[in-house]
Amino acid sequence: VIPLFFVSFAIPNGFFVFWAWVCLVVSVLFLIAQLVVLLDFSYSWSDDWASREEDKYTTGLLVCTVAMFIGAIVFIALSFVYFGKGDCQLNQAMTSIPLVC
């Protein structure tokens, strides 16, 4: 591992520009994959609990849904408080987009 550390200093800067673009593309693909897994999990969980037709599972599903909506609202509010300060309109725009959608 130590020799790799010293060899990394010999890599030209142009490689890191290329590597930044590779990382950008791969990170977008990774985020899409995470969204698919999260949506699949949430639909499976909802179908499983809704199919049991017992009051405790229906209540549990409702409580979890309300808790996640409250968590999303708190997250957006904290994003405005911590990231929407000052004159940075990009942060304010990125925080406002989930409210519009």
Image (tube, grey):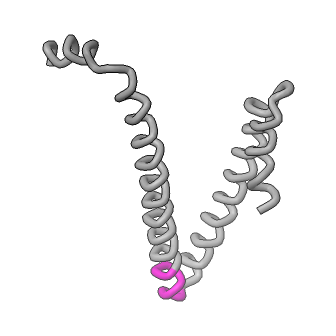
Residue 28, position as x, y percentages in the image: 49, 51
In this image, 29 relative to 92: left or right? left
* 49 drawn magenta: yes
In this image, 68 relative to 1: left or right? right
Secondary structure mostly seen in magenta is helix
Q: Nearer the viewer, residue 43 or 1?
A: 1
Identify the residue shown where x is 39% and y is 26%. Answer: 14
Residue 22, position as x, y percentages in the image: 40, 43
**Can you say which quadrant of the picture contains the C terminus?**
bottom right
In this image, 36 relative to 70: left or right? left
Q: Is residue 66 above or below residue 28?
A: below
Q: Quadrant of residue 78?
A: top right
Identify the residue shown where x is 42% and y is 53%. Answer: 30
* 3 drawn magenta: no
Residue 8, position as x, y percentages in the image: 25, 18
In this image, 22 relative to 71: left or right? left
**Can you say which quadrant of the picture contains the N terminus?**
top left
Q: Nearer the viewer, residue 6 or 96?
A: 6
Q: Quadrant of residue 21?
A: top left
Disc tally is 0
Q: Is residue 90 above or below residue 30?
A: above
Q: Is residue 49 above or below residue 3?
A: below
Q: Is residue 88 above or below residue 12?
A: below
Check the image and name the residue furthest to the right: 87
Identify the residue shown where x is 51% and y is 75%. Answer: 43
Residue 55, position as x, y percentages in the image: 59, 82
Give the residues in magenta.
47-53
Identify the residue shown where x is 44% and y is 55%. Answer: 29
Q: Nearer the viewer, residue 70 or 21?
A: 21
Q: Nearer the viewer, residue 91 or 67?
A: 91
